Image (cartoon, helix red, strand yellow):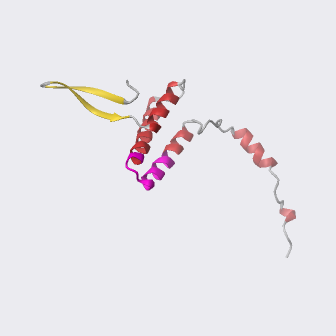
Amino acid sequence: MSIFFRLRPNQTRSGWLVAGTHRVGRVENGLDRELAAGREDIRQAERAALRAQARAVDMAESQKDPDAVSRANAVYLQLREAAALSVAGSKPSDPWADLMAEITRPGAAPSDTAKS
């Protein structure tokens, strides 16, 4: 598989026909590199969903449609979060650490509210 093109040859009467080719975009290429870097915990169906949504982001960017880019990015980021893929180099969220941070965060107690 090339970095830039995915080719699926199909047999025809006159010989081989390359069908279903598309240029792999920026987001899909980045996802492919990230998945190749040793994420065996992500199953094939989840990889396919991530790849399809990454392609949707690339297609929206190529059409220069800001609304489509926003919607595609929102879904893509939700899928990445569900697959426990970090965004922009951040580390995955730890539920226990999040709970402890929420409990120890300073805030107004019920007795600290203003009396009227």
Residue numbers of the magenta segment: 61-75
In terms of depth relative to the viewer, which is nearer, 23 or 94?
A: 23
In screen coordinates, is 32 left or right of 14?
right
Q: Is residue 30 above or below residue 38?
A: below
Q: Which residue is more in the foreground, 47 or 60?
A: 60
Task: Check residue 16 for magenta coloring.
Answer: no
Residue drawn at the location 39% of the way across and 46% of the way down? 62
Name the residue at the left extreme: 13
Q: Quadrant of the C terminus?
A: bottom right
With 79 as the anchor, is 20 left or right in this view? Answer: left
- Residue 93: give x, y in percent of width and height: 66, 39
The answer to whether 113 is drawn above or below residue 38 in the figure is below
Q: How many marks?
A: 0
Q: Position of residue 33 (x, y in %)?
A: 49, 28
Instruction: Specify whether residue 62 is painted magenta.
Output: yes
The x, y position of residue 76, in whole percent, is 49, 43
| Residue drawn where x is 40% and y is 51% of the image | 64
Q: Is residue 4 above or below residue 53?
A: above
Q: Main secondary structure of the magenta part?
A: helix
In the image, residue 49 lies at what x, y percent? 44, 38
The furthest residue to the bottom: 116
- Above or below, 112 against 19 in this view is below
Q: Quadrant of the N terminus?
A: top left
Rendering quarter of residue 13: top left
Left or right of 2? Residue 97 is: right
Q: Which residue is found at the position 87% from the left and 64% from the top?
A: 112
Q: Residue at x 80, y 50 (%)?
A: 105
